[in-house]
């Protein structure tokens, strides 16, 4: 059964997050088997991480790879919330959004919870707000 994971560390900065991503890429572990979705969102000095995994086992198998890298970066992830997925929808990305997500230095985060009906949180920086505002999340 698929699970959703939510990490809300006491302190996770954009610099720390970017460092972890670089380390994971260098280790060949940036796209682990079983991970369906990964999002990082929030203010640059208090980021949170959300993920969807094919199974609890897939999530747990990534721990021995991820945790040493987090410790090296000085990040205490705390205890994640791990919940079974009841329902999940895949939103279709439009070309403009795809370009915005792929540009280095540009942050356009979109988080939709599948656990609470119609719950949504948008955190957008720079000029992508008009593009994202046109998406109906209902």
Image: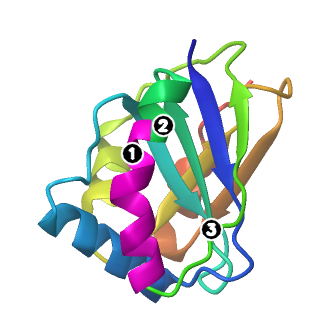
Number of residues whose C-alpha sits closer than 10 Å to that of mark 3, classed few (under 14), some (14–19) or many (20 or more)? some
Q: Which element is circle 2 on?
A: helix
Q: Do the residues labelled 2 and 1 touch (CB within 8 Å)?
A: yes
Picture quadrant of residue 105: bottom left
Based on the picture, tell me whether residue 62 belongs to the magenta stretch.
Answer: yes
Q: On the image, numbered disc 3 is attached to which residue?
A: 77
Q: What stretch is highlighted in magenta?
A: 61-72
Q: Name the residue under label 2.
A: 59
**Lower position in the chain sequence, tag 3 or tag 1:** 1
At horizontal 49% and vertical 71% (from top left) the residue drawn is: 127
Residue count near mark 2 (Cα–Cα under 10 Å), binned few <14, some 14–19, many ≥20: many
The residue that appears at 51% across and 87% down in the rendered structure is 74
State the mark number for residue 62.
Answer: 1
Question: Mark 1, residues whose alpha carbon is within 10 Å: few (<14), some, or many (≥20)?
Answer: some
Q: Dominant secondary structure of the magenta stretch?
A: helix
Measured Cα–Cα span from mark 2 to mark 3: 14 Å
Q: Tell me: residue 96, above or below residue 1.
A: below
Q: Which of 16 and 59 is in front in this view?
A: 59
- The reply to whether residue 131 is in sight is yes
Q: Disc 2 and disc 1: Cα gap in Å?
A: 5 Å
Q: Where is residue 64 in the image (x, y as percent from the top left)?
A: 39, 54
């Amino acid at each position: 059964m698929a699970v959703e994971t939510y990490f809300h560390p006491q302190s996770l900065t954009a610099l720390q997050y970017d460092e972890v991503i670089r380390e994971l890429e260098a280790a060949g572990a940036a796209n682990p088997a079983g991970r369906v979705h990964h999002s990082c969102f929030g203010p640059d000095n208090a980021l949170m991480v959300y993920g969807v995994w094919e199974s609890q086992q897939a999530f747990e198998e990534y721990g021995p790879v991820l945790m040493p890298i987090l410790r090296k970066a000085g990040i205490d992830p705390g205890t994640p919330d791990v919940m079974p997925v009841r329902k999940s929808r895949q939103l279709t990305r439009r070309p403009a959004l795809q370009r915005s997500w792929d540009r280095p230095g540009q942050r356009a985060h979109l988080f939709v919870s599948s656990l609470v009906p119609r719950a949504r949180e948008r955190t957008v920086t720079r000029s992508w707000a008009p593009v994202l505002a046109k998406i109906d999340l209902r």
